[in-house]
Image: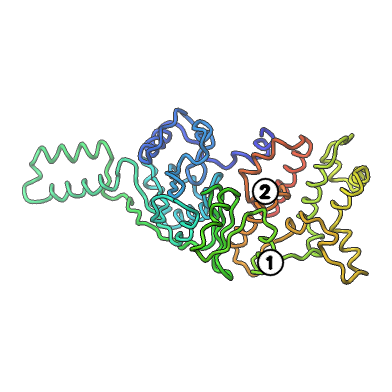
Amino acid sequence: MEKLKQAGLYGDALVKVSGSLAQRYNGCLDMLGVPRTQLESFSVDGMGWSPEIAEEKKDHYYLNIGEANSNAIIISPLQKDKPVHMPFHSFDRDIMTAIFAAYEKEIRDITKDSAICVHLDQEIDAYYEPFDLLRYKKLSVSFRLLNRLQEKQKEQLELVAQFEEGNNFIDRSLHNKILESAKKYGDLRHRNLQLEPITLDIGSFYTKAFGGIFVLRDFVNDIIIFEEMEVFERAIKNTVHEVSLFHTSHNELTSTLVNYRITEFDIKRAAKTARYERIKKHRFVAHLEQVAHPLHEVLDSPFLFKKYLNDIEVEVRKRLMSVELYNQRKIVERDLKIDQVVDLEYTKALLEPHSSLEEEEEELIWKLLTKIIPLDPLHLYWYDKETFYNTYPTWKDSYKDWVIQCILEENKKYNL
């Protein structure tokens, strides 16, 4: 992972936490009922998730209270616009963006000497079956301040109001109460500490619950797509809910996505894209055995690519180049069917979100397509970082170099 760190593709854009900030972070963990960290310094992302603490606890989702209840910690205003490295839901980063848009000034004030626990509440205490996710239509985001600062502010205001009544200014015990509160919490009277709950509508989404599930709404009918076959097989026995159920491996899923205008497929157009080249080269590398040149040179040189391509077994070579073969033959063979020539992996991997989708839906469908067939290393990094980081160590070193360069170039192109 060292190469990724050096390239700024792993653990980048995090906020450093130590000293009093680390103490406040532990205070927030106490509020959530999560054991404290023993680390004196660590870093956090936009949701307050720390890779170091996750490693310490051997739990990527240590901020969650069960699968139905997610939390975040805001320890610093610097978390604004930071990436969310380990989201439990596809909308987690959007939620943090909404919070900072609504309360940026208050967050700056509060985090001077406190911290904020954010609770994402969909009014479901626990999930019992995947169909519970169909009830997930609104999300209430509520806030609790470390040391109950809002309550302490109210107490101070009440004490000051009492002090100003009649002859109470000579009451020594009242003096002492005001001074004790001010010494412990500072002067809270004019602080911006009130964060009203935010309610957000939830449409289609992805969640890590039940091993990973996509819920697609507002199409021909609701669709639930499972990553775990065991969970799918249990769910398919339920005949009460009117919803289409698929596993990510089902061929019927991709045809349904096209029929419902969720995705589209244009093999002639796809063959001209950089995405297709990445997918083809990713598959190509898997079939290379003896290579006398670094892989990044082979993949970037048309001459070396052709040299090693011709060393591969003929049938494998046909599958790798089946898109080009189909487009060439289609010119003269008008009745030629895609499935007669093109490898099935390409017909799945070259799907793309339908052009009619909104930006938020489009990103979700890219994530789904990456889950269905993770053959594009760039999209794997963009839309499924957890799988990318788990897969990356299995690649040859020179292929890692090529992938890193691809990601850096594309990130620069889109100012990511």
Q: Determine the residue positioned at 76% across, 59% down.
A: 347
Residue 275 rendering spot, x and y as whole percentages: 76, 55
Q: Based on the displayed image, in which of its 4 quarters is residue 369 positioned?
A: bottom right
Tag 2 near tag 1, CB within 8 Å: no
Q: Determine the residue positioned at 50% across, 41% down.
A: 61
Q: Which residue in the rendered view is the most extreme toward the left?
A: 167
Horizontal placement of 28 versus 160: left or right?
right
As displayed, is residue 370 above or below residue 297? below
Q: How is the image coloured?
A: rainbow
**Upstream in sequence: badge 2 or badge 1:** 1
- Judged by depth in the image, the label closer to the viewer, 2 or 1, is 1
The front one of 318 and 351 is 318
Residue 319 rendering spot, x and y as whole percentages: 85, 52
**Badge count:** 2
Can I make out residue 339 in this image? yes
Q: What SS does tag 1 mark?
A: helix
Horizontal placement of 294 versus 408: left or right?
right
As displayed, is residue 355 above or below residue 282? below
Residue 412 rendering spot, x and y as whole percentages: 69, 50
Q: Label 2 belongs to which residue?
A: 380
Which quarter of the figure is the N terminus placed in?
Answer: top right
Query: What amino acid is at disc 2?
Result: Leu
What separation in Å lies between label 2 and label 1 (alpha carbons)?
21 Å
Query: What amino acid is at disc 1?
Result: Val
Can I make out residue 82 in this image? no
The front one of 300 and 88 is 88
Q: Determine the residue positioned at 37% across, 38% down.
A: 33
Mark 2 neighbour density, 10 Å: few (under 14) some (14–19) many (20 or more): many
Residue 372 rendering spot, x and y as whole percentages: 67, 53
Q: Label 1 belongs to which residue?
A: 258
